[in-house]
Image (tube, rainbow, N blue to C red):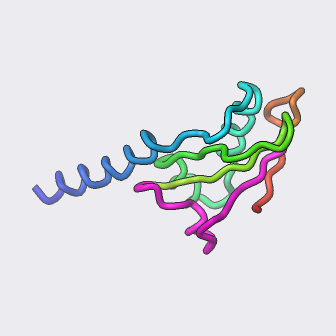
Amino acid sequence: MILLGIFVFIGIGIAIPKLTVYDTVPVSAQLKRCTDSAMEHFDNPFERIALALGKGRIIATQGPSEATMEFYTIFRIPLGILRGQTDMKLGIACNMIDPNDWSAGVK
């Protein structure tokens, strides 16, 4: 019974960001593909796991090839907590010719 309760608790924690985190600005499909590929390349394995359970969102754009993103883990906890930065935002610059060519920097 306790194990079932733990699974339900974790399931709710995973469902909250998946269902409630949305991009705040509209972006082109090509920029969205680029930001999605950038999210898969976090250097810390704990961040990769946390992001797989959570979701990222685009909060701002700077031109057609740059975006600023926020990432959330289970229960909408900001991913920056793992780095000690509660309001961490990631700036992603994409090469629009090759969507897999991108660079990222913490803002």
Residue 40 makes an appearance in the image: no
The residue at 87%/30% (across/down) is 96
- How far across and down, in percent of the image, does residue 98 sit? 86, 29
Q: Is residue 106 shown left or right of residue 85?
A: right
Q: Is residue 38 above or below residue 99?
A: below
Q: Is residue 7 shown left or right of residue 107?
A: left
Q: Is residue 75 magenta-colored?
A: yes
The residue at 48%/60% (across/down) is 77
**Residue 9 is drawn in which quadrant?**
bottom left
Question: In terms of depth relative to the viewer, which is nearer, 69 or 4?
Answer: 69
Q: Quadrant of the C terminus?
A: bottom right
- How far across and down, in percent of the image, does residue 83 sit? 63, 70
The residue at 67%/47% (across/down) is 59
Q: Is residue 20 shown left or right of residue 97?
A: left
Question: In terms of depth relative to the viewer, which is nearer, 3 or 14?
Answer: 14
- How far across and down, in percent of the image, does residue 66 sit? 82, 42
Q: Is residue 78 shown left or right of residue 42?
A: left
Magenta residue span:
74-94
Question: In terms of depth relative to the viewer, which is nearer, 80 or 100?
Answer: 80
**Residue 34 is drawn in which quadrant?**
top right
Q: Is residue 88 magenta-colored?
A: yes
Q: Residue furthest front?
A: 25
- How far across and down, in percent of the image, does residue 36 sit? 66, 37
- Total marks placed: 0
Q: Quadrant of the N terminus?
A: bottom left
